[in-house]
Image (cartoon, helix red, strand yellow):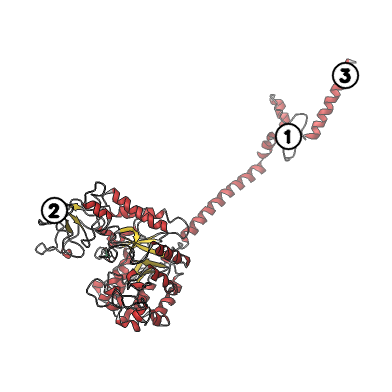
Amino acid sequence: QGEDVLAGLSHISVNTAARNVNLYPFPSKAPNHVSEDPEEKLDSDAEYTQIQPYAGMPKEVLLLHSSKARYRVTREILFWLMVACTLALVALTVTVIALSPRCMNWWQVSPVYQVYLRSFSDSDGDGVGDLKGIQKQLDHFQYLNIKSVWVGPFYRSPMRDSGYDVEDFRAIDPLFGTMNDFEELLAKMHSVGLKLIMDFIPNHTSDRHRWFNLSRATDPHYKDYYVWSDCDGSSPRPNNWVSVFGRSAWTYDEVRGQCYLHQFLKEQPELNFRNPHVRKEMTDIIHFWLAKGVDGFRMGAVKHLLEAAHLRDEPQVDPNKAPVSWDLYHDYTISQLGLHDLLRDWRAEMEAYSREPGKYRFMVTESYDYEEVDKTMMYYGTSLVKESDFPFNFYLLDLPQNTSGLWVQHLVQLWMDNMPKGQWANWLVGNHDKPRIASSAGQTYIRVINMLLLTLPGTPTTYYGEEIGMENVNSASRDPQRSPMQWSGDMNAGFNNKTNVTWLPVHPDYRSINVEVQNSFNAVQLWRNILAPLLHRVYPPRPPLSLPGPEER
Ligand code: NOJ
């Protein structure tokens, strides 16, 4: 009976093996069975090759089949094909990026319109232009296809230098309105697609600034915020340095009993940028306005930011003459080592606010380096370190000296030939510091000069009123080119309509030269017609012009 049982069991096992064959289409061994015996292994390999590949086959079978030539070769072909496709795709992407014209930024697709705030539009009838006045005139920019507006200084100021003498960098002067007015203007401008560029005036403050009062009182934190040197009321000044406006650049301060330096008015003491606290203060001010949403800064008087610490006399051009500014070589008061580092640091701060699409913060620098174009070009930064988007190009201010095509060509080429590769050009023919182009070149030329300005490659900056050919008024001060905007033939040329007062006289030609008259024809139409196509232009790759240099003509 015991034998019968064993025979029965062996029968069962045979049946089970048979069932295995059905379940796993290879003979006699379980899927995970690995034989130790080499002969048995050869047998089983031979058996495996009999089996067609199937989904879910075990590793051994898979390896066996995949090493067959037809699978191996196909696999290799596919692999190298994939590598080649990936490389081709990368090469194609790089080529497309390299060859495509660069996307232009907002400051490249529209002229910049310079508003001289005191004179643009007076909303409250006190005779001085204000922030609400600008808001009233936004249609004018839209009509002209202008997208960027540079608004002159509106900081609280005693106005010894038309607002370029700042008493508080975080406050609006009541003459121009309130912080609320500013925020409203900015929001309104943004809502109609306009960008606002403001002045940043880092070189000096007003002598009424809190820092200066603390500095002259030798407050331990503020005593080195400005450039001080020993001198007394009667003895000679610390050195022969002269201010841009003439006379000594040093003024004796009775409170402190020392002299302070000022490269402009004596009411504009120079900040000491060798002091890290001063650098930090100015960076904080940049953050303050960027956080409010301003779109860019015009950084003024930048070449004056640092002076040589040794305070040695500057060499006189003619040692026998009395020292006045045009007689000195300004080796120690302008373009000093470290100046560009300051600007590059500020640029870096601005970059942090420029990351969102459409939120790029623009920086333009003001530095008159007529005789040294290389110095101007340094404000572009380097290919590795960004500085200003462009330094103002003041060379066309010389245009009226000789209104000939060759002279124009010379001035244009001066910029184009010296501009670092890959940078963006810019042009202007006037600003609040220079005589109006219509007066210096003559009305006859205003249309062609505007046309030139708008068609040169790069960003044009236009000074308010240039679009209608406004001229200088009679004024003994620095103000001839700052008279009220001529909006219409009405009282005060439409600058205000509440009083007879304007801070400077309106030009007598306002009945014929004003926006209302000229909007329907003439100069303003020229603007519209040239500007609209300009918005879509790309930077033209220009072959070098090969006309004779001015000396050969
Ligand atoms: C540059 C301004 O354009 C000019 O008007 C001013 O007098 C100087 N900075 C000094 O503040």
Total label count?
Answer: 3
Q: How far, Cα to Cα, is label 2 from label 1?
A: 105 Å
Q: Amino acid at mark 2?
A: Cys
From the viewer's side, name the closer residue of 258 and 29: 258
At label 3, the amino acid type is: Val
| Residue 422 can be seen in this image | no
The dot on residue 48 is 1
Q: Is residue 30 left or right of residue 143?
A: right
Q: Secondary structure at mark 3?
A: helix
Q: Position of residue 105 (x, y in %)?
A: 44, 63
State which quarter of the image contains the N terminus. top right
Indicate the position of residue 473 as horizontal and vertical percent values: 27, 77
Element under disc 2:
loop
Q: Nearer the viewer, mark 2 or mark 1?
A: 2
Q: Measuring 85% from the left and 22% from the top, which residue is drawn there?
A: 9
Q: What amino acid type is highlighted by mark number 1?
A: Tyr
Query: Few, some or many C-alpha atoms within 10 Å of disc 3 (few <14, some 14-19, many ≥20)?
Result: few
Residue visible at 27% across and 55% down?
Answer: 210
> From the viewer's perspective, is 341 left or right of 80?
left
Residue 147 image point, x, y percent: 43, 68
